[in-house]
Image (cartoon, rainbow, N blue to C red):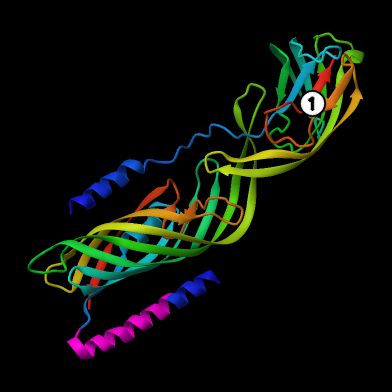
Amino acid sequence: MNLVRILLFLISFFVYSQTDTLKINKRSNYKIKDLFVNADIFGLSKKIFTNQTKISAMTTLRFKKSLHAVIEVGYHSGTYDKLNWNVNGKGIYIKPGVLYFFSEDYQNKNNGFYTGLKLGFTNFSQTINQYPIYGQDFNNQTIKINYRSLPAEQITVFFFEIPLGARVQLGNSKFYLQSELQTKVNISDKNSEGIESLFIPGVGKNNASINFDLFAGIGYKF
Amino acid sequence: MRIIYFILIFILLISCEDSEVCEDDYTPLMYLEFRKKATDSLTNKNNYFVVLKDVANKEINYKIENNSSTLKLPISFENSTKTKSLTLFLEENATEDKKLIINFEYDIKPQYISKACGFRYTFANFETKINQLGFAVDVKQNTNKIENEFSSHITIFD
Protein backbone atom coordinates (compact mmCIF):
# COMPACT_ATOMS: atom_id res chain seq x y z
CA MET A 1 0.00 0.00 0.00
CA ASN A 2 2.83 2.32 0.96
CA LEU A 3 4.64 1.44 -2.24
CA VAL A 4 1.62 2.36 -4.32
CA ARG A 5 1.55 5.77 -2.61
CA ILE A 6 5.25 6.27 -3.25
CA LEU A 7 4.87 5.32 -6.92
CA LEU A 8 1.89 7.68 -7.31
CA PHE A 9 3.90 10.45 -5.74
CA LEU A 10 6.81 9.84 -8.10
CA ILE A 11 4.57 9.63 -11.17
CA SER A 12 2.83 12.89 -10.24
CA PHE A 13 6.25 14.41 -9.60
CA PHE A 14 7.42 13.43 -13.08
CA VAL A 15 4.24 14.54 -14.77
CA TYR A 16 4.59 17.86 -13.02
CA SER A 17 8.23 18.27 -14.02
CA GLN A 18 7.30 17.22 -17.57
CA THR A 19 4.74 20.04 -17.91
CA ASP A 20 7.29 22.34 -16.41
CA THR A 21 9.82 21.33 -19.10
CA LEU A 22 7.28 22.02 -21.83
CA LYS A 23 6.87 25.56 -20.51
CA ILE A 24 10.63 26.01 -20.57
CA ASN A 25 10.69 24.68 -24.16
CA LYS A 26 8.56 27.56 -25.32
CA ARG A 27 10.76 30.10 -23.65
CA SER A 28 14.32 28.90 -23.97
CA ASN A 29 14.32 26.04 -26.53
CA TYR A 30 15.39 23.57 -23.85
CA LYS A 31 16.15 20.19 -25.35
CA ILE A 32 16.43 16.94 -23.49
CA LYS A 33 20.11 16.22 -23.58
CA ASP A 34 22.42 13.57 -22.25
CA LEU A 35 19.69 11.07 -21.46
CA PHE A 36 21.24 7.75 -20.44
CA VAL A 37 19.83 4.35 -19.60
CA ASN A 38 22.17 1.99 -17.77
CA ALA A 39 21.85 -1.72 -17.05
CA ASP A 40 23.60 -3.12 -13.97
CA ILE A 41 25.77 -6.02 -15.20
CA PHE A 42 27.49 -6.41 -11.82
CA GLY A 43 24.09 -6.77 -10.15
CA LEU A 44 23.13 -9.53 -12.58
CA SER A 45 26.40 -11.36 -11.88
CA LYS A 46 25.50 -11.61 -8.17
CA LYS A 47 23.27 -14.54 -9.14
CA ILE A 48 26.40 -16.53 -10.01
CA PHE A 49 28.61 -15.65 -7.04
CA THR A 50 26.17 -15.09 -4.18
CA ASN A 51 22.69 -16.12 -3.04
CA GLN A 52 21.31 -12.81 -4.32
CA THR A 53 19.29 -11.92 -7.41
CA LYS A 54 19.56 -8.30 -8.48
CA ILE A 55 18.10 -6.79 -11.62
CA SER A 56 18.48 -3.04 -11.79
CA ALA A 57 18.63 -0.15 -14.21
CA MET A 58 19.39 3.52 -13.88
CA THR A 59 18.47 6.46 -16.05
CA THR A 60 20.16 9.86 -15.86
CA LEU A 61 19.31 13.18 -17.50
CA ARG A 62 21.37 16.37 -17.49
CA PHE A 63 19.20 19.25 -16.30
CA LYS A 64 21.80 21.86 -15.43
CA LYS A 65 25.48 22.33 -16.24
CA SER A 66 27.02 19.47 -14.22
CA LEU A 67 23.87 18.23 -12.53
CA HIS A 68 21.97 15.14 -13.63
CA ALA A 69 18.64 13.85 -12.38
CA VAL A 70 18.86 10.13 -11.70
CA ILE A 71 16.40 7.37 -10.98
CA GLU A 72 17.39 3.79 -10.25
CA VAL A 73 14.86 0.97 -10.05
CA GLY A 74 15.38 -2.69 -9.41
CA TYR A 75 14.33 -6.03 -7.99
CA HIS A 76 16.54 -7.56 -5.34
CA SER A 77 16.24 -10.77 -3.39
CA GLY A 78 18.65 -12.57 -1.11
CA THR A 79 19.38 -14.16 2.23
CA TYR A 80 21.18 -12.97 5.34
CA ASP A 81 22.78 -16.08 6.80
CA LYS A 82 25.09 -15.01 9.62
CA LEU A 83 25.18 -14.89 13.43
CA ASN A 84 22.70 -17.80 13.57
CA TRP A 85 20.08 -15.81 11.66
CA ASN A 86 18.52 -16.86 8.38
CA VAL A 87 16.44 -14.10 6.85
CA ASN A 88 15.01 -13.82 3.33
CA GLY A 89 14.12 -10.52 1.73
CA LYS A 90 12.69 -9.88 -1.72
CA GLY A 91 11.10 -6.90 -3.38
CA ILE A 92 11.48 -3.90 -5.60
CA TYR A 93 13.18 -0.62 -4.80
CA ILE A 94 13.32 2.85 -6.30
CA LYS A 95 16.00 5.51 -5.82
CA PRO A 96 15.50 9.01 -7.22
CA GLY A 97 18.27 11.55 -6.77
CA VAL A 98 20.78 13.97 -8.21
CA LEU A 99 24.29 13.40 -9.56
CA TYR A 100 26.98 16.05 -9.69
CA PHE A 101 29.88 15.63 -12.15
CA PHE A 102 32.80 17.20 -10.31
CA SER A 103 35.23 16.32 -13.06
CA GLU A 104 34.28 16.32 -16.76
CA ASP A 105 36.30 15.56 -19.88
CA TYR A 106 36.52 18.81 -21.86
CA GLN A 107 36.07 17.00 -25.21
CA ASN A 108 33.08 14.91 -24.11
CA LYS A 109 31.29 16.25 -21.07
CA ASN A 110 29.61 12.90 -20.52
CA ASN A 111 32.90 11.33 -19.52
CA GLY A 112 33.82 12.09 -15.98
CA PHE A 113 33.67 11.45 -12.27
CA TYR A 114 30.65 12.17 -10.16
CA THR A 115 29.07 11.98 -6.75
CA GLY A 116 25.55 12.83 -5.60
CA LEU A 117 22.67 11.85 -3.40
CA LYS A 118 19.82 9.39 -3.86
CA LEU A 119 16.88 8.63 -1.63
CA GLY A 120 15.85 4.98 -1.58
CA PHE A 121 12.47 3.39 -0.88
CA THR A 122 11.70 -0.28 -0.79
CA ASN A 123 8.60 -2.20 0.17
CA PHE A 124 9.50 -5.83 0.46
CA SER A 125 8.61 -9.18 1.92
CA GLN A 126 10.78 -10.46 4.75
CA THR A 127 10.72 -13.97 6.19
CA ILE A 128 12.74 -14.81 9.29
CA ASN A 129 13.40 -18.51 8.79
CA GLN A 130 15.57 -18.74 11.86
CA TYR A 131 16.48 -16.49 14.74
CA PRO A 132 18.65 -17.47 17.70
CA ILE A 133 17.73 -17.34 21.39
CA TYR A 134 20.68 -17.07 23.73
CA GLY A 135 21.10 -17.98 27.36
CA GLN A 136 23.75 -19.23 29.75
CA ASP A 137 24.65 -22.70 30.99
CA PHE A 138 25.82 -23.76 34.46
CA ASN A 139 29.35 -22.52 33.70
CA ASN A 140 28.10 -19.06 32.75
CA GLN A 141 28.97 -19.76 29.13
CA THR A 142 26.72 -18.28 26.49
CA ILE A 143 24.79 -20.92 24.62
CA LYS A 144 22.08 -21.04 22.00
CA ILE A 145 18.99 -22.23 23.79
CA ASN A 146 16.77 -22.49 20.79
CA TYR A 147 15.91 -21.37 17.29
CA ARG A 148 12.57 -20.00 16.23
CA SER A 149 11.06 -18.48 13.09
CA LEU A 150 8.63 -15.74 12.15
CA PRO A 151 6.20 -15.68 9.20
CA ALA A 152 6.60 -13.40 6.16
CA GLU A 153 5.94 -9.73 6.72
CA GLN A 154 5.73 -6.70 4.41
CA ILE A 155 8.21 -3.98 5.40
CA THR A 156 8.98 -0.48 4.10
CA VAL A 157 12.53 0.76 4.43
CA PHE A 158 13.94 4.21 3.64
CA PHE A 159 17.62 4.84 3.07
CA PHE A 160 19.86 7.36 1.42
CA GLU A 161 22.79 6.68 -0.78
CA ILE A 162 25.93 8.60 -1.73
CA PRO A 163 27.31 7.34 -5.06
CA LEU A 164 30.88 7.88 -6.22
CA GLY A 165 31.26 6.90 -9.83
CA ALA A 166 32.74 7.34 -13.26
CA ARG A 167 31.39 7.19 -16.81
CA VAL A 168 33.41 6.72 -19.97
CA GLN A 169 32.44 6.42 -23.64
CA LEU A 170 33.19 3.15 -25.42
CA GLY A 171 35.09 4.25 -28.53
CA ASN A 172 32.93 6.50 -30.66
CA SER A 173 29.71 4.63 -29.99
CA LYS A 174 26.58 5.61 -28.13
CA PHE A 175 27.54 3.14 -25.39
CA TYR A 176 29.22 4.11 -22.16
CA LEU A 177 30.75 2.16 -19.30
CA GLN A 178 29.46 3.33 -15.96
CA SER A 179 30.50 2.22 -12.53
CA GLU A 180 29.69 3.61 -9.10
CA LEU A 181 30.40 2.74 -5.51
CA GLN A 182 27.25 3.22 -3.48
CA THR A 183 27.42 4.09 0.19
CA LYS A 184 24.09 3.45 1.88
CA VAL A 185 22.74 4.61 5.22
CA ASN A 186 19.42 3.28 6.46
CA ILE A 187 16.96 5.81 7.82
CA SER A 188 14.36 3.32 9.00
CA ASP A 189 14.83 -0.42 8.85
CA LYS A 190 12.70 -1.96 11.58
CA ASN A 191 9.69 -4.22 11.23
CA SER A 192 6.51 -4.01 13.29
CA GLU A 193 8.15 -5.81 16.23
CA GLY A 194 11.22 -3.58 16.23
CA ILE A 195 13.44 -6.21 14.63
CA GLU A 196 16.15 -4.83 12.38
CA SER A 197 15.79 -5.89 8.73
CA LEU A 198 18.81 -7.97 7.80
CA PHE A 199 18.33 -8.18 4.04
CA ILE A 200 16.98 -5.08 2.29
CA PRO A 201 16.36 -4.85 -1.47
CA GLY A 202 18.54 -2.04 -2.86
CA VAL A 203 20.84 -2.23 0.15
CA GLY A 204 21.67 -5.93 0.33
CA LYS A 205 22.88 -7.54 3.54
CA ASN A 206 22.45 -5.11 6.38
CA ASN A 207 25.88 -5.75 7.91
CA ALA A 208 26.55 -2.41 9.54
CA SER A 209 25.14 1.05 10.00
CA ILE A 210 26.71 1.91 6.63
CA ASN A 211 26.62 -0.58 3.76
CA PHE A 212 28.32 -0.59 0.38
CA ASP A 213 27.38 -1.89 -3.03
CA LEU A 214 28.53 -1.47 -6.60
CA PHE A 215 26.55 -0.55 -9.67
CA ALA A 216 28.58 -1.36 -12.76
CA GLY A 217 27.32 -1.78 -16.27
CA ILE A 218 26.69 -0.43 -19.71
CA GLY A 219 24.77 2.70 -20.54
CA TYR A 220 23.20 3.86 -23.78
CA LYS A 221 22.98 7.54 -24.67
CA PHE A 222 19.80 8.60 -26.44
CA MET B 1 36.24 19.03 -4.14
CA ARG B 2 38.37 18.43 -1.05
CA ILE B 3 35.27 18.34 1.10
CA ILE B 4 33.95 15.40 -0.92
CA TYR B 5 37.15 13.44 -0.32
CA PHE B 6 37.03 14.21 3.39
CA ILE B 7 33.43 13.07 3.61
CA LEU B 8 34.22 9.82 1.80
CA ILE B 9 37.27 9.08 3.95
CA PHE B 10 35.21 9.83 7.06
CA ILE B 11 32.47 7.44 5.91
CA LEU B 12 35.02 4.69 5.22
CA LEU B 13 36.55 5.18 8.66
CA ILE B 14 33.31 4.91 10.60
CA SER B 15 31.83 2.12 8.54
CA CYS B 16 33.52 -0.83 10.22
CA GLU B 17 31.31 -3.88 10.62
CA ASP B 18 28.94 -3.80 13.55
CA SER B 19 30.10 -5.66 16.60
CA GLU B 20 29.18 -9.29 16.16
CA VAL B 21 29.78 -10.14 19.79
CA CYS B 22 26.93 -9.88 22.22
CA GLU B 23 28.01 -8.80 25.66
CA ASP B 24 24.85 -8.68 27.69
CA ASP B 25 21.13 -9.30 27.76
CA TYR B 26 20.93 -13.05 27.72
CA THR B 27 18.06 -15.10 28.99
CA PRO B 28 18.08 -14.43 32.74
CA LEU B 29 19.03 -17.14 35.20
CA MET B 30 16.87 -18.11 38.14
CA TYR B 31 18.35 -16.28 41.13
CA LEU B 32 18.10 -17.96 44.55
CA GLU B 33 19.40 -16.55 47.81
CA PHE B 34 19.89 -18.27 51.17
CA ARG B 35 19.04 -16.66 54.48
CA LYS B 36 18.96 -17.67 58.12
CA LYS B 37 15.34 -17.67 59.26
CA ALA B 38 16.21 -16.42 62.75
CA THR B 39 18.28 -13.39 61.73
CA ASP B 40 17.13 -12.86 58.12
CA SER B 41 20.81 -12.51 57.16
CA LEU B 42 22.45 -14.05 54.12
CA THR B 43 24.16 -17.35 54.81
CA ASN B 44 26.94 -18.93 52.77
CA LYS B 45 26.90 -22.54 51.67
CA ASN B 46 29.99 -24.40 50.50
CA ASN B 47 28.41 -26.72 47.99
CA TYR B 48 25.13 -26.87 46.20
CA PHE B 49 23.86 -30.03 44.59
CA VAL B 50 21.26 -29.28 41.99
CA VAL B 51 18.96 -31.52 40.02
CA LEU B 52 16.78 -29.84 37.41
CA LYS B 53 14.07 -31.82 35.68
CA ASP B 54 12.36 -30.55 32.56
CA VAL B 55 8.98 -31.42 31.06
CA ALA B 56 10.32 -34.53 29.40
CA ASN B 57 11.82 -35.58 32.75
CA LYS B 58 15.28 -35.00 31.34
CA GLU B 59 17.56 -34.53 34.32
CA ILE B 60 20.45 -32.15 34.71
CA ASN B 61 22.63 -32.85 37.75
CA TYR B 62 25.09 -30.30 38.88
CA LYS B 63 27.41 -29.63 41.81
CA ILE B 64 28.23 -25.99 42.39
CA GLU B 65 31.13 -25.11 44.70
CA ASN B 66 31.01 -21.42 45.29
CA ASN B 67 30.85 -20.72 49.01
CA SER B 68 28.24 -18.12 48.40
CA SER B 69 24.83 -17.13 49.62
CA THR B 70 23.39 -16.94 46.15
CA LEU B 71 22.81 -19.39 43.35
CA LYS B 72 21.96 -18.67 39.73
CA LEU B 73 20.52 -21.48 37.65
CA PRO B 74 19.72 -21.70 33.95
CA ILE B 75 16.13 -22.85 33.71
CA SER B 76 15.77 -23.02 29.96
CA PHE B 77 17.78 -25.62 28.12
CA GLU B 78 18.34 -26.53 24.49
CA ASN B 79 15.12 -27.96 23.05
CA SER B 80 13.28 -27.50 26.29
CA THR B 81 10.72 -24.83 26.85
CA LYS B 82 9.69 -25.40 30.43
CA THR B 83 11.53 -26.69 33.45
CA LYS B 84 9.36 -28.35 36.00
CA SER B 85 11.24 -29.25 39.11
CA LEU B 86 14.29 -28.22 41.11
CA THR B 87 15.83 -30.48 43.74
CA LEU B 88 18.43 -28.88 45.96
CA PHE B 89 20.63 -30.37 48.69
CA LEU B 90 23.78 -29.32 50.46
CA GLU B 91 25.66 -32.61 51.01
CA GLU B 92 26.49 -35.19 48.41
CA ASN B 93 25.05 -38.10 50.39
CA ALA B 94 22.01 -36.25 51.65
CA THR B 95 19.09 -38.48 52.44
CA GLU B 96 15.86 -37.98 50.49
CA ASP B 97 14.23 -36.16 53.40
CA LYS B 98 17.03 -33.55 53.42
CA LYS B 99 16.33 -32.54 49.84
CA LEU B 100 14.41 -29.40 49.01
CA ILE B 101 12.10 -29.96 46.06
CA ILE B 102 10.42 -27.01 44.35
CA ASN B 103 8.09 -27.39 41.38
CA PHE B 104 7.69 -24.41 39.16
CA GLU B 105 6.00 -23.20 36.02
CA TYR B 106 6.22 -20.19 33.76
CA ASP B 107 5.25 -18.89 30.33
CA ILE B 108 8.12 -18.27 27.97
CA LYS B 109 8.30 -15.02 26.02
CA PRO B 110 10.95 -14.45 23.33
CA GLN B 111 12.24 -10.87 23.34
CA TYR B 112 14.32 -9.27 20.58
CA ILE B 113 17.57 -7.66 21.73
CA SER B 114 19.72 -6.94 18.66
CA LYS B 115 21.21 -8.56 15.58
CA ALA B 116 24.27 -9.79 17.50
CA CYS B 117 22.41 -10.76 20.68
CA GLY B 118 19.47 -12.27 18.82
CA PHE B 119 16.57 -12.99 21.16
CA ARG B 120 16.37 -13.95 24.78
CA TYR B 121 13.64 -15.55 26.82
CA THR B 122 11.88 -13.90 29.68
CA PHE B 123 9.57 -15.81 31.99
CA ALA B 124 6.13 -14.58 32.90
CA ASN B 125 3.53 -16.03 35.28
CA PHE B 126 6.29 -17.61 37.30
CA GLU B 127 4.81 -19.84 39.99
CA THR B 128 6.50 -22.06 42.52
CA LYS B 129 5.06 -24.85 44.62
CA ILE B 130 6.94 -26.46 47.48
CA ASN B 131 6.98 -30.21 47.08
CA GLN B 132 9.26 -30.93 50.05
CA LEU B 133 11.11 -28.51 52.32
CA GLY B 134 14.01 -30.84 53.19
CA PHE B 135 16.85 -28.91 54.82
CA ALA B 136 14.99 -25.61 54.50
CA VAL B 137 12.47 -24.19 56.93
CA ASP B 138 10.76 -21.82 54.52
CA VAL B 139 10.80 -20.78 50.88
CA LYS B 140 9.59 -17.44 49.61
CA GLN B 141 8.87 -16.53 46.01
CA ASN B 142 9.83 -12.88 45.48
CA THR B 143 8.47 -12.24 42.01
CA ASN B 144 6.05 -13.60 39.47
CA LYS B 145 8.25 -12.81 36.47
CA ILE B 146 11.90 -13.41 35.65
CA GLU B 147 13.26 -10.67 33.41
CA ASN B 148 16.61 -9.86 34.96
CA GLU B 149 18.99 -10.90 37.73
CA PHE B 150 19.03 -7.68 39.73
CA SER B 151 17.31 -9.16 42.77
CA SER B 152 16.57 -12.67 43.95
CA HIS B 153 13.55 -14.52 42.59
CA ILE B 154 13.40 -17.08 45.39
CA THR B 155 14.63 -16.84 49.00
CA ILE B 156 15.36 -20.06 50.88
CA PHE B 157 15.44 -19.87 54.67
CA ASP B 158 17.17 -22.45 56.86
Position of A133 compared to A98: left or right? right
Residue B149 position within the rendered picture, expressed as x and y whole percent measured from the top left: 68, 29
Residue B73 position within the rendered picture, expressed as x and y whole percent measured from the top left: 72, 25
Position of B38 compared to A123: left or right? right
**Residue in the picture at 60% in, 45% down:** A131
**Residue in the picture at 81% in, 9% down:** B91
Which image quadrant is residue A155 in?
Answer: bottom right
Residue A199 position within the rendered picture, expressed as x and y whole percent measured from the top left: 48, 54
Please name the residue that numbered disc 1 is placed on.
B154
Task: Please report, as a chain letter, where disc 1 is located.
Answer: B
User: Magenta segment: does it hold A145?
Assistant: no
Instruction: Give above or below for A91 relative to B63.
Output: below
Which image quadrant is residue B92 in?
Answer: top right
Which image quadrant is residue A54 in?
Answer: bottom left
Residue A28 position within the rendered picture, expressed as x and y whole percent measured from the top left: 18, 86
Instruction: Give above or below for A149 relative to B19.
Output: below
Element assignment for label 1: strand
**Residue in the picture at 59% in, 51% down:** A129
Instruction: Give above or below for B117 relative to B6.
Output: above
User: Magenta segment: does it hold A15?
Assistant: yes
Q: Which residues are magenta?
A: A10-30
Q: Nearer the viewer, residue A219 or A2?
A: A2
Residue type at mark 1 is Ile
* Count of residue discs: 1
Q: Nearer the viewer, residue A194 or A219?
A: A194
From the image, which quarter does the N terminus of chain B lie in?
bottom left
Farthest residue to the front: give it. B39
- Crowding around mark 1 (Cα neighbors within 10 Å: few <14, some 14 to 19, many 20+) is some
Position of A39 compared to B90: left or right? left
Question: Dominant secondary structure of the magenta stretch?
Answer: helix
Position of A44 compared to A122: left or right? left
